Amino acid sequence: MSNSLISNLLGAWKGISSPFTGKRLELSPYLHENELQPLRDKIKECLESRGGQVSARAHAAELGQAYLGLNNEGKQKYLRLLVDEFGIDHDQVRETAEALFSDLDTDTRSIIEQQLREQLRPPFLTLLTQFNALPQGVKFLVDMRADLISLKRENPDLSPIDRELCRQLASWFDIGFLELKRIDWNAPASLLEKLIEYEAVHRVESWTDLHHRLADNRRCFAFFHPRMPEEPLIFVWVALVSELSDNVDKLLDTTHSEDENKDVTTAIFYSITSTQRGLSGVSLGDFLIKRVTQELRRELPDLTVFSTLSPIPGFAKWLNAQQDENEAPLITDSDRKLISSKTERTIEHLLEEPDWLEDASIAPSMQKILQRLAARYITEEKNGSIRALDPVAHFHLSNGAIVERINWLADTSDRGKAQSYTMMVNYLYNLDKIESNHELYIEQGKIAQSKTVESL
């Protein structure tokens, strides 16, 4: 949570919390043991709505202010208090559930079912709902969820509140509530700065770089929520070109421009960034590409090809792990023989130090080997029985895309070399086959791929 947001929230909520809350709740950043009781009392006052709804809202604002003043240790204690003392009373639930299976008339059974529903709703959920009603309360809860994602790694007991908050956010950020907007160079500077700040795939190097990405043959679209109007939740960069792109360096080169005389037939989605860590697990990207495709088809009816140019973030790590395990080696004797005819260095050494990418005597042979292995990684390696191991592959395959092409020397940045030896993938969205590809992948783990990829 940024300092500016904290400052804005504190300012907005200060006016709500006073003068309705009586004695101020003052907590140290570490939330010491002797401060838990005042916090506990304030939460009870809020949940019990003492003094009416206006007073409850004021208490919620004060509790939100208190949370913002805590460090990670203090936040962990605050959230743990909510789970331990304002979570589901399992003994009470068990007793009610047992009563439900006794010999009851219809009306009594209905009453007990309603009691059970109410008991399965943790009291802390009421507090979260009250936070949501505050100015910028949605953003506050999104950032609280981001805190939970980090904190629960070492504090798994926080999982109940994390799950409940994720469930609430999923309903509040339903696709029906989101607005798709095109962002261009005329957008407010504050929004353009956020594109630079948030971009996670291909760093925006300068304002000139940003201007190039928002040129006439480029597009940027983002989803916004009405309660977070200044925050792009997820955004995608699109290049409008005449053929399937195989090199992101060329797309990002501010000195390079496509031939304006060529017909634009292809939309290349070359970067998708989710900006809010707290919305992890809330499906936004699934809808973004489909909605953007619809917008582009309305604007440019001659567009016939929709594809990504995507990284392979887990490939190098996976390949190195496979080599360490020494089980059914992926690198064959013929691979080794091929490389040994070109250099005295082993394939393992070449993988550790990829300084050979522009060496014409070695690179073509390594390209053949690595493209074959990348195809296997993307289309065969699983996280479980169905889901593709590579997260980017899983995202696009679950959306119904086809693994169309694996491109060599597609991303020659340090990051591209480190994670995939410069390779990138075109995931093609064939609009006539999206639904069938999606069903086959989700239900059976079958991955649609081109003959070019199959031949690798």
Image: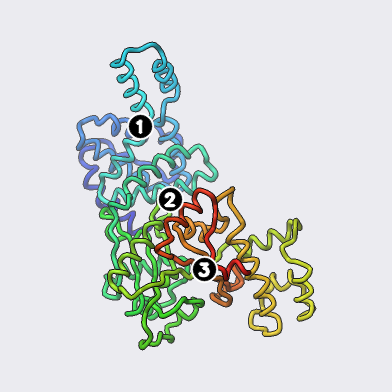
Whole-percent x, y for residue 119 in the image: 36, 26
Instruction: Check contact, mark 1 vs mark 2: CB within 8 A.
Output: no
Between residue 185 and residue 387, name the one nearer to us: 387
Q: Residue at x 31, y 69 (%)?
A: 297
Whole-percent x, y for residue 90 in the image: 44, 25
The residue pinned by badge 3 equals 404
Q: Is residue 361 left or right of residue 141?
A: right
Q: Residue at x 56, y 64 (%)?
A: 313
Q: Earlier in the sequence, mark 1 or mark 2?
A: 1
Q: For label 2, count other residues whose C-alpha is less than 10 Å away and answer few (under 14), some (14-19) or many (20+).
A: some
Using the image, tell me which numbered label, if any, was put on residue 123. Answer: 1
Q: Earlier in the sequence, mark 1 or mark 3?
A: 1
Rendered view: 239 above or below 234: below
Rendered view: 454 above or below 210: above
In which quarter of the view is residue 195 placed?
bottom left
Element class at badge 3:
strand
Residue 205 visible in the picture: yes
Q: Residue at x 32, y 80 (%)?
A: 216
Q: Is residue 395 left or right of residue 65?
A: right
Q: Residue at x 53, y 49 (%)?
A: 444
The N terminus: image quadrant: bottom left
The Cα atoms of the two marked residues, 1 and 3, are separated by: 50 Å
Please state which amino acid type lies under the numbered disc 1.
Pro
Q: For label 1, count other residues whose C-alpha is less than 10 Å away and answer few (under 14), some (14-19) or many (20+).
A: many
Rendered view: 46 above or below 73: above
Rendered view: 394 above or below 125: below
The residue pinned by badge 2 equals 146
Using the image, tell me which numbered label, if any, was put on residue 382. Answer: none
How is the rendered protein coloured? rainbow
Q: For label 3, count other residues whose C-alpha is less than 10 Å away and answer few (under 14), some (14-19) or many (20+).
A: many
Residue 190 visible in the picture: no
Q: How many marks?
A: 3
